[in-house]
Image (spheres, helix red, strand yellow):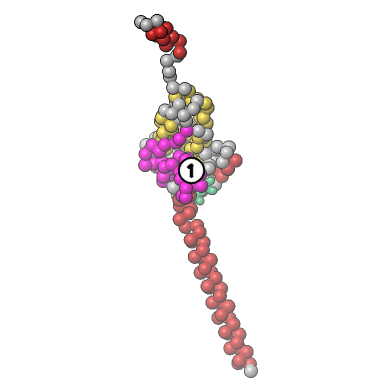
């Protein structure tokens, strides 16, 4: 009687342990599947919606997650006045900070961002949450001066007006984590003008002459 009850207890113990081990294995499998490739694609290979644009994530930048390192200086440079439909080159520079490596996220309120080389790419679904932003394709190493420089293109929209470019730059320590990094952002307001054209007045004498048979 006593022995039987011991056996029953033992059976119950091993079954219980089996269930615990099995659920632990399932939990591990689920977490690896859910977090594994997603994290790598979403972060160190570019993240969207963190350019400082008030239209995405309340205008937050990389500092939402990366904020324990030295704050860098981030600048955006390029033409402030362009013709409709024209393509120009812009540059985001991360200086100071960790002086080791960096990444970026740029968004615009109009026109089209264009990748300037292998260090950047244009975000697209399903890999990215937001389409059409300019992000780093991998952590870019700082140059000899400790700066991280990204050159890229932007094509102006077909109609005249004002476009805002938002750019965030993250200065990282290349430890493949969020610690020891920090970021800053910059904004450019670009005026898009009608393409240079001959004014109607310049045509007038010609039209008059033609109408008079000259
Ligand atoms: C929601 C949190 C989060 C935000 C916001 C975020 N990151 Fe990250 N980032 C991570 C995590 C987590 C890692 C580490 C895992 C990895 O590399 O994917 C990381 C890693 C990185 C790395 C590699 C860091 C190193 O030291 O090696 C770079 C570069 C990077 N992110 C750039 C950016 C940029 C640029 C922004 C802003 C435009 C940004 N991140 C915003 C979570 C975030």
Q: Specify whether tag 1 is near ligand 1 (CB below 8 Å).
A: no
Q: Quadrant of the N terminus?
A: bottom right
Task: Find out whether residue 114 is within the magenta segment.
Answer: yes
The furthest residue to the bottom = 1
| Residue 124 in the image: above or below residue 201 | below
What residue is shown at x 51% (from left), y 47% (from top)?
129
Residue 65 percent location from the top left of the image = 54, 47
Task: Find out whether residue 97 is within the magenta segment.
Answer: no
In-front residue for pair 210/131: 210
What residue is shown at x 50% (from left), y 33% (from top)?
110
- What range is drawn magenta here? 111-140
Q: Label 1, on which residue?
A: 131
| Residue 117 in the image: above or below residue 35 | above
21 displayed left or right of 116: right
In-front residue for pair 116/180: 116
Q: Quadrant of the C terminus?
A: top left
Residue 16 percent location from the top left of the image = 58, 78
């Amino acid at each position: 009687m006593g022995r039987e009850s011991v056996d029953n207890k033992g059976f119950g113990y091993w079954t219980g342990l089996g269930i615990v081990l099995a659920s632990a294995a399932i939990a591990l499998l689920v977490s690896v599947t859910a977090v594994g490739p997603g994290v790598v694609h979403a972060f160190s290979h570019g993240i969207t919606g963190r350019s400082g644009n008030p239209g995405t994530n309340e205008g937050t930048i990389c500092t939402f997650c990366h904020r324990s390192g030295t704050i860098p200086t981030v600048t955006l440079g390029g033409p402030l006045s362009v013709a409709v439909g024209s393509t120009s080159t812009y540059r985001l520079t991360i200086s100071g900070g960790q002086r080791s490596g960096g990444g970026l996220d740029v968004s615009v309120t109009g026109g089209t961002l264009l990748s300037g080389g292998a260090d950047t790419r244009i975000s697209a679904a399903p890999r990215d949450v937001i389409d059409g932003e300019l992000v780093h394709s991998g952590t870019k190493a700082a140059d000899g001066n400790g700066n991280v420089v990204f050159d890229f293109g932007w094509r102006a929209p077909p109609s005249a007006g004002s476009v805002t470019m938002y750019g965030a730059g993250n200065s990282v320590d290349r430890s493949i984590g969020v610690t020891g990094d920090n970021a800053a952002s910059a904004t450019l307001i670009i005026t898009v003008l009608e393409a240079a054209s001959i004014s109607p007045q310049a045509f007038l004498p010609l039209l008059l002459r033609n109408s008079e048979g000259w």
